[in-house]
Image (spheres, rainbow, N blue to C red):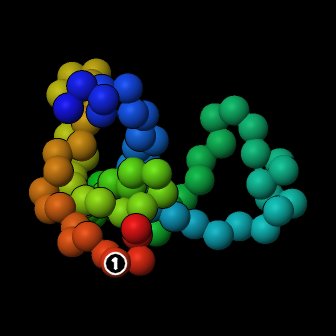
Amino acid sequence: MATLDKVSVDLMVVLGTTTMPVHQVMRLSRGAIIELDATEQDEVKVLANNLPIASGVVTVDRNRISVEVKRMLPKNADQR
């Protein structure tokens, strides 16, 4: 198992998505608000190296934001 200690995995949590025209993206500035197709009660997707591996919920404890994994997704043959 010691060889796995040095393997890096990019983790990403997706709260929601949206679509907007490029000209609108180009005008975004600090503090801009982007509306997503999700609410704070919706499950989030957890991706490892851009592959979905789990879903969960966002939890907030004081100033700390975390994701509680609720369900591991089945391994797909296409992900090999």
* Residue, disc 1: 77
- Residue 72 spot, x, y in % from top left: 17, 61
Residue in front for this viewpoint, 44 or 74: 74
The residue closer to the viewer here, 49 or 16, is: 49
Q: Would you identify the image quadrant in which residue 71 lies?
A: bottom left
Give the residue drawn at x 30%, y 29%.
3
Above-or-below relation of 69 to 19: above
Q: Secondary structure at mark 1?
A: helix
Instruction: Tell me the quadrant of the picture where the C terminus can be found.
Output: bottom left
Specify few, some or many for label 1: CA neighbours under 10 Å numbering under 14, 14-19, or 20 or more: few
Name the foreground residue: 25 vs 78: 78
Q: Residue furthest left?
A: 70
In the rendered image, is residue 45 in sight?
Answer: no
| 48, above or below 79, in the image | above
What's the residue at 13%, 57% (across, down)?
Answer: 70
Q: Quadrant of the N terminus?
A: top left
> Residue 29 at what x, y percent from top left?
75, 38
Q: Is residue 37 found left or right of 75 in the rendered image?
A: right
Query: Who's the residue at 39% across and 33% down the image?
Result: 7
Q: Amino acid type of disc 1?
A: Ala
Residue ID at (26%, 70%): 75
Q: Nearer the viewer, residue 1 or 47?
A: 1
Q: Residue furthest bottom?
A: 77
Q: Is residue 56 visible?
A: yes
Residue 6 screen position, x and y as percent: 38, 26
Q: Is residue 10 above or below residue 79?
A: above
Q: Quadrant of residue 68?
A: top left
